[in-house]
Image (cartoon, rainbow, N blue to C red):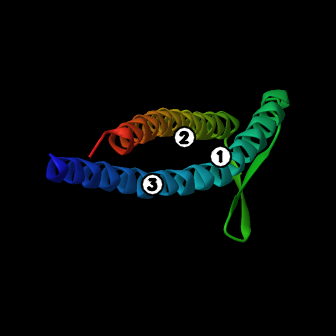
């Protein structure tokens, strides 16, 4: 009947509205990830350079760590361990960020497919005889 077509049409429109509001929020999250990921990669590169320098150091080398305004002498092995841990931590963060971006891509693709389905349903409803 005409009433059921109107209800079905209204439900489809409401579903489209939900999807339309869902997608921009995901794009904002993606943008934030693309801003944060490069800074994490830069930090990882910086620590990789520090690691290279520490690998060149000998047991007679003196290593200093900046703590606040002061340079404090640090044990070479402790410095290497700290740098390796930091690189591991940053790498883990980058992997998590990549997983988040991949999941967002999948959800956006699914939302796009759903929008296309809804558009096809709307076309069928509009073409149906009243």
Q: Dot 3 corresponds to which residue?
A: 20
Q: Dot 1 corresponds to which residue?
A: 37
Q: Where on the picture, by quarter, is residue 49?
A: top right
Category of crowding for the residue at label 2, using alpha-carbon neighbours closer than 10 angstroms: few (below 14), some (14–19), many (at least 20): some
- Taking 6 as reference, is 85 above or below it? above
Locate residue 105 relative to residue 124 in the image: left or right. Answer: right
Tell me which residue sits at (48%, 51%) in the image: 23
In three-dimensional space, the C-alpha distance between marks 3 and 1, rounded to whole angstroms, equals: 26 Å
- The answer to whether the residue labelled 3 contacts the one labelled 1, judged by CB atoms less than 8 Å apart, is no
Q: Dot 2 corresponds to which residue?
A: 97
Q: Where on the picture, by quarter, is residue 93?
A: top right
- Which numbered disc flags the more N-terminal residue, 3 or 1? 3
Q: What element carries label 3?
A: helix
Checking the image for residue 101, the label placed there is: none
Image position, residue 105 (x, y; %): 53, 36
- The answer to whether the residue labelled 2 contacts the one labelled 1, judged by CB atoms less than 8 Å apart, is yes
Tell me which residue sits at (15%, 48%) in the image: 4
């Amino acid at each position: 009947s005409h009433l059921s077509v109107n209800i079905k049409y209204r439900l489809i429109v409401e579903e489209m509205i939900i999807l339309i509001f869902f997608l921009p929020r995901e794009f904002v999250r993606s943008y934030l990830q693309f801003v944060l990921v490069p800074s994490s990669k830069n930090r990882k590169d910086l620590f990789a350079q520090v690691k290279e320098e520490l690998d060149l150091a000998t047991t007679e080398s003196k290593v200093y760590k900046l703590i606040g305004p002061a340079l404090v002498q640090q044990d070479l092995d402790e410095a290497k361990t700290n740098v390796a841990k930091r690189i591991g931590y940053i790498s883990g963060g980058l992997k998590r960020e990549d997983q988040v971006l991949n999941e967002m891509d999948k959800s956006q693709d699914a939302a796009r497919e759903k929008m296309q389905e809804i558009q096809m349903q709307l076309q069928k409803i509009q073409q149906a005889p009243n």
